[in-house]
Image: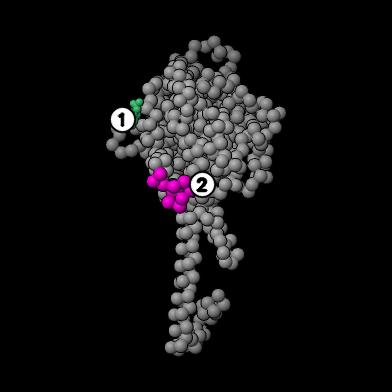
């Protein structure tokens, strides 16, 4: 270090310096040192590779080297993917203008669970802007599987929502009294529509003062929309749709309690709930009685179109949520130690502790919100699935690592929000690939806890950790409207519109 500095900053002396050490003896001396150094580097790194392969705690030798290896290992497990200079950006362009259609009103019935409704509401803000309408605070879904009687202001901060978007669209709490009895256009807008569709729909204003939107999910295209509309969607979802103070406050408390238990935690969206298993027809690891119960539920649920499902084919196709046992094997293979704190962001786990024990046997440090909050604190949330899901959402966004066991609205929403906030680590299991690996475990080709298992799982997930990338379009070759369904959803990855590099000018300051 000292020699190097002397060499570069006193360049006048450098020739003397060099001559002094350039005798044949010193050259040999250099070669020996170089050789020794390369051996040191080689052992250091091969040890790291061994670490990777064997998953044994670092053994032997000097404490400093050990802590270095532990640090490397820790980084792999917990550090966010590299996203140099990228940051959220939601400011509109200079051409952008608020719309103030003060005498035309849009009422909306949001459908679906919490995350489907959130995305739908953000889209309706954009639609109201395109159509120059005043948006009436949306009604929430009370009929879905989640059976929740909450109204908008139970879940969201209504005043904040209205104020945050006041330079975008006019939003009111209720339809004016004199318009309540006015005839209104009841519309089922086409899925994944673009701006021109909604501009055409604006013709309805010639005949109506109120348009009622019957469904809010997936009404707006993911791609090929004006830049300012995409930015507006991000402002609506990530800034305006804040949860109600009651939910935010309890969410903060639960986060503090989690952090007091461990420095870092994984939020696991363990989508191993009855409705999901029944809907997907996945029965792997279940008893015959359980499988039958789920089949009967599927037959009796009218709006689920597909009744006959081959569970084996579903699983091989990667269409099943990971079972608690499979999640346990997965986390262990990735190298997370048994002491890892894991928050379960989910409703009721199917089969309760019987199935859950296959995960807790490997990771005993598992907590549900019921263990973090008192009965009194949770009382207001029971029987309100959407409010309870909002708590899970907050804890999932703030976690060091987020892992969904299945794809779905919550998994997509959380992934997108984490990307937006700075590409926080999100590990998306390759379920199809994992099933192939698990089958090798079951047939005895691979051994549980082995380094080859670990190696395979890590390799499969090296590029599935939430690193920055642009939103994906539909697979090539798919034409027509069918491709919209296959595009990566806007809110799963708002890059590039709402995530900018350091060279972009019109970004926000926060
Ligand atoms: C929006 O609606 C208002 C009336 O509510 C109207 O005065 C204004 O011209 C409209 N703007 C556009 C761009 O159509
Ligand atoms: C389900 O699919 C698997 C694999 O294709 C097949 O072997 C099995 O016979 C099917 N089961 C039923 C009940 O059709």
Q: Residue at x 52, y 11 (%)?
A: 182
In the rendered image, the vertical position of residue 10 relative to residue 137, given as above or below: below
Q: Which residue in the protein does label 2 denote?
A: 332
In the rendered image, the vertical position of residue 94 relative to residue 98, given as above or below: below
Which region shows up in magenta?
444-455
Name the spot of residue 210 as percent of width and height, x first: 50, 17
Q: Quadrant of the image for the C terminus?
A: top right
Element on which disc 2 rests? helix
The reply, left or right, for residue 377 in relation to residue 333 is right
Q: Answer few, some or many: residues within 10 Å of disc 1's Cα (few below 14, many 20 plus, some between 14 and 19).
A: few
Discs 1, 2 touching: Cβ within 8 Å: no
The reply, left or right, for residue 463 in relation to residue 328 is left
Name the spot of residue 487 as percent of width and height, x first: 38, 35
The single residue placed furthest to the front in the displayed view is: 444
Q: Residue at x 67, y 41 (%)?
A: 257
In the rendered image, the vertical position of residue 479 relative to residue 65, given as above or below: above
Corner quadrant of residue 226: top left
Q: Residue at x 60, y 29 (%)?
A: 388
Q: Nearer the viewer, residue 163 or 391?
A: 391
Of the residues tagged 1 and 2, which is closer to the observer?
A: 2
Q: Residue at x 48, y 39 (%)?
A: 326
Q: Which residue in the protein does label 1 denote?
A: 480
Q: Quadrant of the image for the N terminus?
A: bottom right
Corner quadrant of residue 481: top left
Element on which disc 1 rests? loop
Q: Answer few, some or many: residues within 10 Å of disc 2's Cα (few below 14, many 20 plus, some between 14 and 19).
A: many
Q: Nearer the viewer, residue 175 or 254?
A: 254
For the image, the number of numbered tags is: 2
Q: Nearer the viewer, residue 238 or 401?
A: 401
Residue 393 visible, this angle: no
Residue 21 visible, this angle: yes
């Amino acid at each position: 270090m000292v020699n190097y500095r002397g060499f570069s900053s006193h360049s006048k002396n450098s020739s003397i310096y060099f001559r002094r050490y350039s005798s044949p003896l010193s050259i040999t001396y250099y070669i020996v040192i170089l050789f020794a150094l390369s051996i040191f580097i080689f052992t250091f790194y091969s040890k790291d590779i061994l670490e990777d392969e064997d998953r044994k705690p670092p053994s032997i030798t000097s404490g400093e080297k050990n802590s270095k290896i532990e640090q490397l290992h820790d980084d792999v497990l917990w550090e966010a993917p590299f996203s140099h200079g990228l940051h959220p950006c939601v400011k509109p362009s200079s051409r952008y203008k608020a719309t103030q259609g003060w005498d035309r009103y849009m009422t909306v019935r949001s459908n679906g669970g919490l995350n489907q409704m959130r995305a739908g509401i953000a889209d309706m803000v954009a639609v109201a802007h395109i159509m120059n309408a005043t948006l009436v605070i949306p009604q929430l879904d009370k009929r879905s599987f989640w059976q929740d009687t909450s109204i908008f202001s139970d879940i969201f901060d209504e005043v904040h929502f209205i104020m945050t978007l006041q330079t975008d669209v006019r939003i009111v709490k209720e339809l004016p009294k004199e318009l309540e009895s006015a005839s209104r256009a009841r519309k089922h807008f086409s899925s994944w529509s673009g701006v021109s569709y909604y501009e055409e729909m604006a013709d309805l204003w010639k005949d109506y003062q109120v348009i009622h939107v019957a469904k809010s999910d997936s009404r707006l295209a993911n791609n090929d929309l004006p830049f300012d509309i995409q930015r507006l969607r991000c402002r609506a979802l990530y800034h305006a749709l804040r949860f109600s103070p009651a939910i935010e406050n309890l969410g903060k408390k639960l986060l503090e309690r989690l952090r007091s238990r461990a420095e870092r935690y994984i939020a696991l969206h363990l989508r191993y709930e009855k409705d999901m298993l029944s809907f997907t027809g996945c029965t792997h690891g279940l008893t015959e009685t359980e499988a039958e119960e789920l089949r009967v539920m599927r037959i009796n649920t009218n709006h689920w179109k597909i009744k006959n499902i081959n569970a084996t084919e579903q699983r091989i196709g990667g269409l099943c949520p990971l079972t608690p046992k499979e999640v346990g094997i997965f986390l262990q293979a990735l190298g997370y130690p048994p002491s890892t704190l894991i928050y379960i962001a989910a409703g009721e786990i199917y089969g309760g502790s019987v199935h859950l024990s296959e995960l807790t046997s490997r990771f005993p440090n598992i907590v549900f919100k019921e263990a973090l909050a008192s009965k009194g604190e949770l009382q207001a949330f029971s029987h309100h699935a959407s409010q309870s899901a909002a708590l899970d959402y907050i804890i999932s966004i703030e976690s060091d690592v987020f892992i969904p066991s299945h794809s779905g609205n919550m998994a997509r929403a959380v992934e997108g929000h984490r990307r937006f906030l700075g590409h926080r680590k999100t590990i998306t299991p390759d379920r199809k690939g994992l099933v192939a690996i698990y089958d090798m475990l079951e047939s005895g080709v691979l051994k549980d806890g082995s380094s080859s298992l670990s190696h395979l799982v890590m390799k499969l997930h090296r590029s599935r950790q939430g690193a920055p990338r642009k939103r994906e379009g539909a697979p090539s070759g798919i034409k027509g409207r069918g491709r919209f369904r296959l595009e990566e959803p806007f809110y799963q990855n708002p890059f590039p519109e709402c995530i900018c590099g350091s060279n972009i000018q019109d970004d926000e300051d926060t």
